[in-house]
Image (cartoon, rainbow, N blue to C red):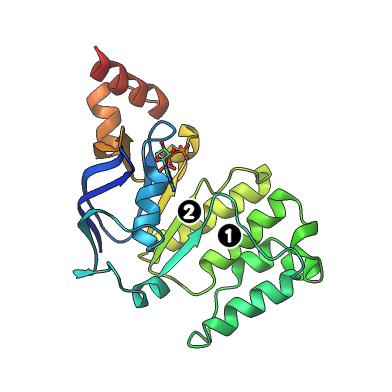
Amino acid sequence: MLAIENLCKSYGKLKVLQHVSVNFGTGKVVSVIGPNGTGKTTMIKCILGMALPDSGDIKMSGQSVLNQHDYRSQIGYMPQIGRYPENMKIRQVIGMVKDIRKDIKNTDEELVGLYGLEQLYDKRMGALSGGTKQKVSAALAFLFHPQVLILDEPTAGLDPVSAEILKSKILKEKKNGKLILITSHIMSEVEEVADEVMCMMDGKLKFYETIAAIKQQTHENRLSRAIAKIMNEEED
Ligand SMILES: Nc1ncnc2c1ncn2[C@@H]1O[C@H](COP(=O)(O)OP(=O)(O)OP(=O)(O)O)[C@@H](O)[C@H]1O
């Protein structure tokens, strides 16, 4: 579905991505993990066309996406921190995005409903709490039934009930055959929603395994311990 081939990206002398290759299938939740500054967001930016790799390729359904833009309509993106025009009301932001995607008549408004965003429609984006802004970002990411969802630390800032709503939505869309990539530092959360873990370290792919395989290999029941064990073994 989504393949990354030998991806390299540097910012000046800093090699942020070094020959990263990975193949993501459909109907899966993949958690992208790794220490701060290891290139997770940069990889996501390359997938989204927000950063151009120095070399390598990114393919969606076998076609290179580099220097293309139509493929973006197949991706729903929830950024770590959504930035919106401060003066626009929630109603206007959602309306504007729908206007750009007039091709999709049947939108997915489930999160708009579950988060009660209609009741807040006349609030300005600049006046929203961080968590409410996150809810708008989540609702927008799922709005057009994208085949691929990229969620960057999606539950950071959400209250527990709202986080559960999002996790249920993620699992529902996985059942609908979507590919969902999630970056997260919260291992208990990764364990709850993900099937596979892609671990990055110093700009390189450290491992890409199912959660079951990671636990089996390390003889650990808790993912956080299993990951710590792998990292410590690598250091020894
Ligand atoms: N536009 C840029 N210009 C220069 N350096 C950058 C730029 N974007 C990212 N970097 C650097 O690239 C490295 C990887 O950053 P990136 O944001 O991809 O890491 P990350 O794994 O997503 O980290 P985190 O877990 O903290 O979100 C960091 O050292 C960062 O400072």
Give the answer, above or below, for where 50 lies relative to 226: below
Q: Residue 54 location in percent, x, y?
A: 25, 53
Q: Which residue reaches farthest top?
A: 236
Amino acid type of the residue that numbered disc 2 sits on in the rendered structure: Leu
Separation of marks 2 and 1 at Cα, in angstroms: 8 Å
Residue at left offset 31%, top offset 32%:
201
- Badge 2 density bin: few <14, some 14–19, many ≥20, Cα 10 Å: many
Q: Which residue reaches farthest front?
A: 12
Give the answer, above or below, for where 106 lies relative to 158: below
Q: Quadrant of ligand 1?
A: top left
Q: In this rendering, does residue 155 appear at all? A: yes
Which residue, given by chain and number where applicable, does mark 2 sit on?
151
Q: In this rendering, does residue 211 appear at all? A: no
Give the answer, above or below, for where 117 lies relative to 203: below
Residue at left offset 38%, top offset 48%:
42
Q: Residue 150 location in percent, x, y?
A: 43, 57
Disc 2 to disc 1: CB gap under 8 Å: yes
Amino acid type of the residue that numbered disc 1 sits on in the rendered structure: Ala
Which residue, given by chain and number where applicable, does mark 1 sit on?
138
> Is tag 2's residue or tag 1's residue first in the polypeptide sequence?
1
Query: Does any atom of ligand 1 lie closer than 8 Å to the CB of label 1?
Result: no
- Asked whether 51 or 212 is in front, the reply is 51
- Asked whether 14 or 194 is in front, the reply is 14
- Asked whether 181 or 190 is in front, the reply is 181
Give left or right: position of 65 versus 34. left
Disc 1 secondary structure class = helix
